[in-house]
Image (cartoon, rainbow, N blue to C red):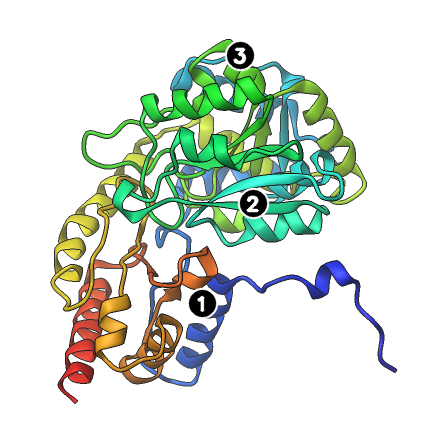
Amino acid sequence: MEFLLSNRVLALTPSSTLAITAKAKELKAQGVDVIGLGAGEPDFNTPQHILDAAVQSMNEGQTKYTPSGGLPALKKAIIEKFKKDQGITYNLNEVMVGSGAKHALYTLFQVLLNDADEVIIPTPYWVSYPEQVKLAGGKPVYIEGFESNEFKITSEQLKEAITPKTKAVIINSPSNPTGVIYSETELRELGNVCLKNNILIISDEIYEKLIYGSQQHVSIAQLSPELKEQTIVINGVSKSHSMTGWRIGYAAGNKNIIEAMTNLASHSTSNPTTTSQYASIAAYNGSQEPVEEMRQAFEKRLEIIYEKLIAIPGFTCVKPQGAFYLYPNVKAAATSAGFQDVDAFVEALLVDAKVAVVPGSGFGTPDNIRLSYATSLELLEEAVRRIHQFVESKMEK
């Protein structure tokens, strides 16, 4: 018997990042020497004191339901983190803990959007933004972040994109997939446009701890009381503390929105995983040395791999300032190598060179590819060597 699926699910585009990672793992299981650069997760284990806290919580019988919006102790740890890092204060009823930052975003769109409400999404974008907007009945409206402006949108572009149906704009800084960061001045200019037009700001700050060089993370919510009230901050422990599988993220902002999100979560997940919540309390209240050690390791890899990558013929790349991705434009290389488009180039790269990268088409910019440097330096250098050799061999034909 064949069952008809809902239109909203049939309209979904599968996650390109998860698809390429699954394909690489499948080939590895078959004994193929594939180097996967698709995964968006640190290659470090969760720090030991966090693991210990999780075990302790289970041994003490902390394995039951918690409040739908998260343990008060975890909310307090998150609130202290905001005070320390951004100098802003939230109350317990302004924080909702979800089953990952992705779940927090999904829940936010569900409580925020009515049919045909518009959400402005800068390109390149994280692959799940438009799909989650569509699942909530909303309409993604794209603004191109030009490579000449480090993939960042301007206040003028934002003004032009706003319509009577605009409900929110997403700002992701540091960005996935580009790794670029909005400055305080840029954020103020964008924020002023949102204030004048009563547009909600969704600030995805999941990579805030992974920033390099002299750059500093600035949350748009910390710039003024008005912008704080206009902003929902999305964050979590997945990237900062290498806890992707623990699935703990959170939203902070307007108490009415947070209450609605909590009510919806009570009918979907009941509560975030209890053990993971206790682990996350330890993540924020315990030593932050592992976070800094991981950041330094990523920065070292970036400095080495970036120079090797831009030496590949036909590759240009805005140097990332945060996260752990490189997002080169490879259109010239793909064309010179005889490929119809970058997607075909990526497919051949996997088959012939045994390197898995994510095509930029999944992020709204089909001329690019995303490479994660959240893997060992040895594997990164070998992967870039293979890519370089692959491109040159195709150009010679």
**Measured Cα–Cα span from mark 3 to mark 2:** 25 Å
Q: Which residue is mark 1?
A: 21
Task: Identify the residue position indicated by label 3 in the image.
Answer: 226
**Residue at 49%, 30% in the rendered image:** 159
Determine the residue positioned at 20% across, 75% down.
386
Number of residues whose C-alpha sits closer than 10 Å to that of mark 2, classed few (under 14), some (14–19) or many (20 or more): some
- In front: mark 2 or mark 1? 2
Disc 2 and disc 1 in contact, CB within 8 angstroms = no
Residue lying at the far top of the rendered structure: 225
Dot 3: within a 10 Å radius of its alpha carbon, few (fewer than 14), some, or many (20 or more) residues? few
Q: Residue furthest bottom?
A: 397
Dot 2 falls on a residue whose secondary structure is strand
CB-based contact (under 8 Å), mark 1 and mark 3 = no
* In the foreground, 380 or 134: 134
Residue 141: image tag: 2
- Foreground pick, 232 / 275: 232
